[in-house]
Amino acid sequence: MGRKRVTTTKENSTGRNTAFHDNYTSNDMTRAQFVKQIESGNYDNYHVRKINGVKTPVSNPDKNVNNNLD
């Protein structure tokens, strides 16, 4: 099993993920930055959902646990 591409590094009091780390490039991103990267097509295994009116990065539903955000 390989290492996860992206991990969550911070969440707010409601549990919303607010900061992320790309383990391949060592890039730290805010939620908004990660959303923009996903929408630009730079992260194939992730997509954006609008949850309570906020664009939120989520991993694509599949059997691969390596792309899950936790």
Image (cartoon, rainbow, N blue to C red):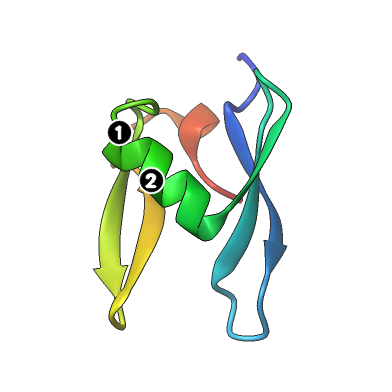
* Quadrant of the rendering where the N terminus is positioned: top right
Q: Amino acid at mark 2?
A: Lys
Residue 49 position within the rendered picture, expressed as x and y whole percent measured from the top left: 26, 60
- Does the residue at mark 1 contact the one at mark 2 (Cβ under 8 Å)? yes
Residue 12 position within the rendered picture, expressed as x and y whole percent measured from the top left: 66, 77
Residue at 65%, 56% in the rendered image: 19
Q: Amino acid at mark 1?
A: Ser
Q: Foreground: 20 or 61? A: 20
Look at mark 1 in the image and give the residue it sits on. Answer: 40
Looking at the image, can residue 60 be seen? no
In this rendering, the answer to whether 57 lies above or below 54 is: above
Q: Of helix, strand and loop, which one carries label 1?
A: loop
Q: Of helix, strand and loop, which one carries label 2?
A: helix
Residue at 26%, 68% in the rendered image: 50
Looking at the image, can residue 49 be seen? yes
- Mark seen at residue 36: 2
- Mark seen at residue 29: none
